[in-house]
Image (spheres, rainbow, N blue to C red):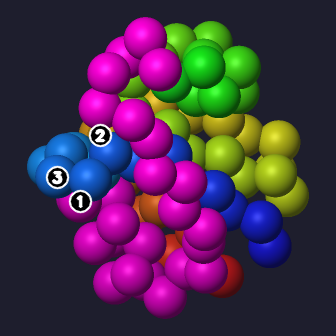
Amino acid sequence: MSITLYALDGCPYCEDVHDALQTHDVDYDTIWVEGLHSERDEVKRVSGQRAVPVLIDDERGVTMNESENILTYVERTLANR
């Protein structure tokens, strides 16, 4: 399984996603991004925008942003493995 989370240290939305992934024992890697949007070129490359959090599930070909969408995905898809 290859789950990657792009996150910003101190971002409450990112922390919510981290907590959900950990609660459901999902293995994932975190890529910490810069605070300035203008320096988030990698996030833009993978998701088409610069906001975080962004979750990538390589196994399913899923890339998503917006913490509420990610939390729903974690609950419905990743937690049931």
Do the numbered discs 2 and 3 sit on residues whose CB atoms are within 8 Å? Answer: no
**Residue at (46% x, 31% y) in the render:** 65
Hey, which quadrant is residue 1 in on the image? bottom right
Q: Point out the tag, 1 or 3, that comes first from the N-terminus.
A: 3
**Where in the figure is residue 31, as x and y percent of width and height?**
55, 54
Disc 2 marks a residue whose amino acid type is Glu
Task: Determine whether, in the image, residue 36 is placed left or right of residue 42.
Answer: left
80 or 65, which lies in front?
65
Task: Determine whether, in the image, residue 49 is placed left or right of residue 63.
Answer: left
**Where in the figure is residue 11, as x and y percent of width and height?**
19, 46
Q: Find disc 2 in the rendering and name its residue.
A: 68
Q: Point out the tag, 2 or 1, that comes first from the N-terminus.
A: 1
Do the numbered discs 1 and 3 sit on residues whose CB atoms are within 8 Å? Answer: no
**Residue at (45% x, 41% y) in the render:** 33
Magenta-highlighted residues: 15-39
57 or 11, which lies in front?
11
Q: Point out the tag, 2 or 3, that comes first from the N-terminus.
A: 3
Disc 3 marks a residue whose amino acid type is Gly
**Label 2's element?**
helix
**Label 1's element?**
helix
Seen in the picture, residue 64 relative to 80 is either above or below; the reply is: above
Q: Find disc 3 in the rendering and name its residue.
A: 10
Estimate the spatial distance between the alpha carbons at disc 2 and disc 3, rounded to whole Å. 17 Å
Q: Find disc 1 in the rendering and name its residue.
A: 15
**Where in the figure is residue 60, as x and y percent of width and height?**
81, 51
